[in-house]
Image (spheres, rainbow, N blue to C red):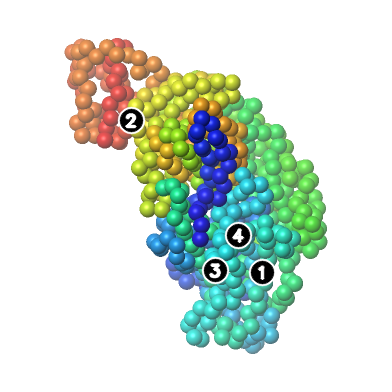
Amino acid sequence: MRQLVIIALLAMLTHGVCAQEVLLPVGGERKAMGKSVVVESLPFFDDFANTARSRSVWQKGGTLFNQGYAPLPPTIGMATLDAYDADGNLYPEELGQLYSADTLTSPVVRLDSAYVPYARSLSPVDSIYLSFFYLPGGGYGNMWERVGDVPEAGDSLVLEFYSPQDQSWHWVWGRGGISADTLLAQTGSYWQYIVVPITSASYFDANFQFRFRNYCSLDNASKKGILSNADQWNIDCVYINLGRTLADTAMRDMAFVNPAPSLLRQYQAMPARQYQPSELKSNLDLTITNRFSQPLAYHYGYQIADANNTLHSYDGGFDNAPVYWNGYQYQQAEAHAHPQLDYTLPYPMAQPMTFTVTHVLREGVSGDPYPNNDTVVFHQVFDNYFAYDDGEPENGYGITSTYSKVKVACRFQLAVEDTLTAVLLYFNHTYRDQNDDVRFLLTVWDDNDGRPGNIIYQDHTRRRPAYAGLNQYVRYILEDPVVCQGTIYVGWEQTSADFINLGFDRNNDASEHTFYLADSHWQQSILRGAIMLRPYFGQKATVGIADITDHSGVTVKTQGSRIVIDQAQLADVAVFDMMGRCVYSARGISMLTPPLPSGVYWVRVGTSFAKKIIIL
């Protein structure tokens, strides 16, 4: 039992104000898993590298398949059990109670003779073992770099076997709540390798299954909005086969460990018109592992492609990979672990573009028996927004303070003048939607020697947080477009001391560009990660439009989802959305636009009239 704040750093005691950056556990994308019963034969293996396959094989139970909830898994991808259900909601249990939360239930694994090349049925003498790796949430190392939430001592992860004979589940293994650092001190490693024999005759049937289950508990939080997801357990490399032993750890498997990286030095995505060749990295960083008992020779390379063609191929050649188990080694050869980015993307980019970067490794000639972890892909997006984050939160971020005007700002650098039209924010789902009443003002600052300076835009109307759904951002359209150049800071000012629980991506570090203020001094964040805030920019068609104020002889009003424009004299009329796109144009005295989506629009008549209008 506990309050769910896992990191509270940077306490300030200035002018009687106490403020803390707070990092919380949180859930990410949820997808309903396969509903139909899938039948598998021996051997059965899943390292969750192929998310689509995992979703189709495992039974529905709320477990999250992801690539970022724990550092350095055995191979890329993992399954995470936590306190959120399949819809991204905290389970409806009372605070203070221990309850069963997520389950990860296997397909049917036949332990009869149907798929075994023997003339007899399987039995305990066939040495059938189930193995897997696990790591409790909360990460390890520096407190400001950790991911997720550590299960408390009363929480647990259990493994159960299903007996077709008595049609019931049986407990076979369990682990009480513990931190990864404690496991390191006890065992010498973070990820723990578990091997469980299948010995009871009651399991040797055509309908055998196994499942993982976690038990959680939630305590009252001292501040509304803080209570969120918790008690994560991460699982990887689930393997069941016959002819195994307790010492069976090595697998002939060359694999990637981490997701494919961005091509950009700072951003995961950026506006096409803001791209400069200097934004590209000179080298990419990859983590490659060899989980066999001896060095393996393999080939590595990557390709960059647009929507139609392959633009560039990098050949890293063959190299030998050291054995991971020999001192927990990863590949260090520069051509594979840090390949050069020896290609320049098209410049300038006149329109949005997406480039697909595919990294592939192949052991020997035909590859190893586990191909799902041999390929990682990154989609490099150049659209109309900046993003430090990868779109999936591993934690929640906010500021606790006794001061009512807390400010948070993220720094962005524009190569050319542009028009800021909207800001996307990712709010985490909290217990009973407690942070829905927190009010804030979207705010934009200019630069003052590496810190936010003067306010160049601030809302007049207070906003409210809104949970848009799984893996969804809330779009907040600015009341007036803002012409920006150089370095700007985009964020918010809270109008109370309440807590805003915003998504926080732990796999990409933007701490040097993140600042907060809770009295009179801006502080730089030391929490490794990226606030999930994305500023959107339109075209220059809206530049200066707010400065035209002569309304004589023109009437603009809404009629349902249409805009009615009447004018005394013949003139050109144009209607722009908040992204700077012209959605309607005509010439006349009186006109009615087609139906338009809800949002804010600018109506421009000739050269002397412009008006902002809202369609609800």
Q: Which residue is mark 1?
A: 194
x, y (%) of residue 163? 53, 82
Disc 3 on helix, strand or loop? strand
x, y (%) of residue 543? 41, 18
Dot 1 or dot 2, earlier in sequence: 1
Q: Nearer the viewer, mark 1 or mark 2?
A: 2
Q: Which residue is mark 2?
A: 461
Dot 2 or dot 3, earlier in sequence: 3
Q: Residue placed at 48% from the left, 82% from the top?
A: 167
Whether residue 251 appears in this view of the structure is yes
Left or right: where 327 falls relative to 502: right
Q: Amino acid at mark 3?
A: Phe
Q: Which residue is mark 3?
A: 212
- In three-dimensional space, the C-alpha distance between marks 4 and 2, rounded to whole angstroms, equals 43 Å
Left or right: where 417 falls relative to 481: right
Dot 3 or dot 1, earlier in sequence: 1
